[in-house]
Amino acid sequence: MVVTVIECDIAIVGAGLAGMRSAVAVAEKNRKVSVAVIAKTYPIRCHSVCAEGGSAAVLRKDDNFDLHAWDTVKGSDFLADQNAVEYFVRECPKEILRLENWGCPWSRNPDGTIAQRAFGGHSVNRTVFAADRTGFHEVHTLYERLLKYDNVEFFSEYFLTNIAIEDGRVQGIATIRLKTGELEFFKAKAVILATGGAGRLYGFTTYSHQVTGDGMAIAYRCGVPLKDMEFMQFHPTGLVPSGILMTEACRGEGGYLRNKDGERFMKKYAPEKMELAPRDVVARAMWREIMEGRAFEGEHGPYLALDLTHLGEEKIEERLPMIREAAIKFADVDPVEEPIPVKPVQHYTMGGIHTNELTETPVKGLFAVGECACVSIHGANRLGSNSTVECLVFGKVAGEMALKYVENAKETRISSEFVKEEEKRLFDRFGKKGEENPHAIKKELNETMDNYLWIFRDENGLKTALRKILDLKERFAKVAISDAVRKFNVALLSTLEVGYLLDLAEIVAMGALLRTESRGAHYRLDYPARNDEKWLVHSLAYYTSEGPRFEYAPVRITKWKPVERKY
Amino acid sequence: MGVLSWFKYRSPFGMAFMFQRITGLILLFYLCLHLAYLTSLQSRDLYESLTALTVSKQFFIFDSLLILCGVFHGLNGLRIVVHELGFAHEKRKAVLVISVALTILGWILGSYILYTALGD
Amino acid sequence: MKILIRRFDEKSYWQSFEVPVKRGMTVLDALFYIRENIDPTFAFRASCRMGICGSCAVKINGKPRLACETQISKFKEIKVEPLDNFRVIRDLVTEFEGFFVKHKKVKPYLIAEADYENPVEQLQTPQELKRYYIFSLCIKCGACVSVCPASATLEGYLGPAALVAAYRFNADSRDKGKEERLKIASESIGVWRCHSAMECSEVCPKQIEPAKAVQLLRRASLR
């Protein structure tokens, strides 16, 4: 059997904002180190292109770092590690300017300076934006910049299946090259995981189809703990019925949320900030309105109204053109004339692979950055426009840390046992008839998550969810892949992805069940108060064959003691 | 799929592209015929017999079609020139409609003039 | 509704699927339905489902469109095929490596001095931004290349997408690499191979008008 092993110094898995920024960081400092950017789609088709609203940074005199940090820490319901947040806010402005220097088409003020807009949870208008396609433009800018460096090579449509670790040190990764369907291994001295979140756990979600938590699940299976997985962000305005994101910028530019009585109901829940309260506050408010019967009823279920009609066509065309296009195309509604039908939608994974503020995981040479990692900057709830810039700031950190690591690292190796095991694990169930349909399992998983791990949770619901997930895992073991043709075998891919999602679902459900308090995006109807004495800690889930084992680690507090979170 | 792709148009513009090439080939073919025709000027008899054949009411249909090819190729060519100078891309549909309308007008006019000239 | 798909595994063949139709359903929804309920081996590319990633460009009833943006209710019958001018790998998945290689050839990045350690804000007025902004919206879906007759007949032709990228940077007020890019774009496999079929402008899902970008590059290269 011919085994393909590609050698490189640094392997970056995931070509979104975080992955590509790490690659740039390495190449800017060193043109001799070989960097492989490996992703399951072509880089410009990553999920980061869906980001719309903007990237926050302190750029002007009316703003300061402590204020951005405070907004972030308060937004996180005090679960964020404050030393990391303080570093983060100080690097954001430079990242914005670097992207600008590399060609990013930021929207501008009439005098030519970079424009900033209001966003939920931020005290000052500090969200830098490129129309309402910020993620799209940032991704293309980074991809185009990477074309300049000769030592960076793209390996597109390579699907991650495993990480090789020996003696607590990373050795490389195993992937399936989609075009041929064969296993190809990367021997690397350092590996940076930047594989994104796990949104496709849910049925009603803003995520692209391909975001199935691959890196998180594989790292978990390799012994790296996952942190704070019970915190899933629900974005207030998802288009009904597709789940396509209606950016927070709609509210930032002055949009209103109304219930069926035409009332701006946010007045009851966050009288000061109204529609621009942090996402968890608004999502809960909206869901309460839905639960208490004040929502519109439509053929796709209940919904609320996002009203942009008072903004005028000119402003919408200038600042929210893609939103208008999407509302017309996918919901048959023109925001200039009518309010948009919206509902809270699953949107971000605050939790992820446990790293310190230098993006290091407990495994030597393995780094994690972006949404798949948890430093933690966002704690229990993320502020809008903080994630895209987090990918940039920590992307740079990850790249530079990986570079420093490889300068002194020993040679690594892909052992023949690893190769044999991988070949067996993946292709043993090939060409056989299975008893279960993985897509049906995924659909049931989505329903379970939508029902019991949504905005409001309680003990019975969580226990039911956990039972159901374990039942699905048993059924999943009976899946086989009838398609024996290896080339672009989507049946194999879908099956592996469902496997990753099931592992992650168990962790989310158990973490939510164990955390008997409400904090940020995790709200327990049976424990509605925040409990700082017992729960000002991060949850860490470790893999065991009987299911995740939970440990707890304290939150790093530097400047700001937890206070009541009112908006 | 090479040159065959020229004949797989998907929009009126692709159709215009296809006809530009077809009429171009026809005009090229006609040019060769015409040059061969002119070389027949060596002998008076040969010339008169060829002229009697081709300048006649029976041959009118071919001449009319030739006028169509020529007018289309020329006017479409002008349309292309306008666009290749960077103008009117936003109004390209209107430009195409005008070009086709003028082509039809030119064809009818030219055919009419030719027909009346053949009157005898 | 019956959906006909031109599939490919070593060789090409048509297959028909019966798909239940709901109001508001897109062609992409139908493709996923087929994969999830009828044939799990059915290969196609898809990601964002909101028209921004460019993965799902396929030929629907003879015209290249984004499957995620095309409503089923628009048609009485639906035929789905992979994009033309690309080699088919499996079913609707085509080879895109060459596409990105051509994109890279035109140096599609900002060529300007930049201080990496201490970056400085460069000014750009909204008017200057408008000059190139629409050309920066290219999602690299390949629809334009699939209908371009020049791309079909000449393997090495840079193609509308790459030339749009070249123009996007030439028109950016911050860029200093215009001469370099024009040199590449006006080579024999560059802008002069375009014969204004304008089909690219007709099919671009973002209404970018690649034909216009090519002509503007020509104009610039003649100065």
Image: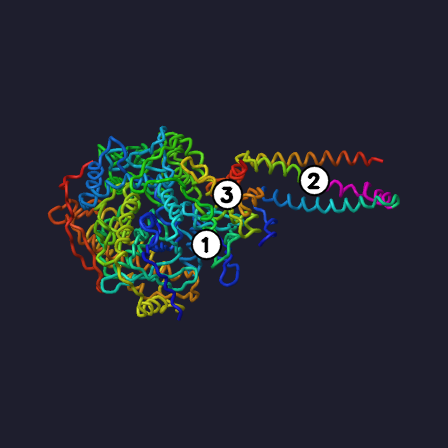
Q: Residue at x 24, y 37 (%)?
A: A121
Front in this rendered view, residue A518 or C200: C200
Assess whether residue B56 is covered by the magenta stretch: yes
Circle 3 or circle 1, nearest the eye: 3
Q: Which mark is residue B70?
A: 2
Dot 2: what SS? helix
Q: Amino acid at mark 1?
A: Glu
Does A120 sit above or below residue B8?
above
- Relative image position of residue C27 (x, y in whole percent): 45, 50
| Magenta span of residues | B46-71
Circle 3 or circle 2, nearest the eye: 3
Residue A288 occupies quadrant: top left
Residue ID for mark 1: C97
| First-in-chain label (3 vs 1) | 1
Instruction: Sort mark 2 into few (<14), some (14-19) or many (20+) by Cα contacts within 10 Å.
Output: many
Is any atom of residue A468 visible in this view?
A: no
Does A535 sit above or below residue A127?
below
Q: CA distance from mark 2 to mark 1?
A: 42 Å
Does residue B92 appear to the left or right of A413 in the view shown? right
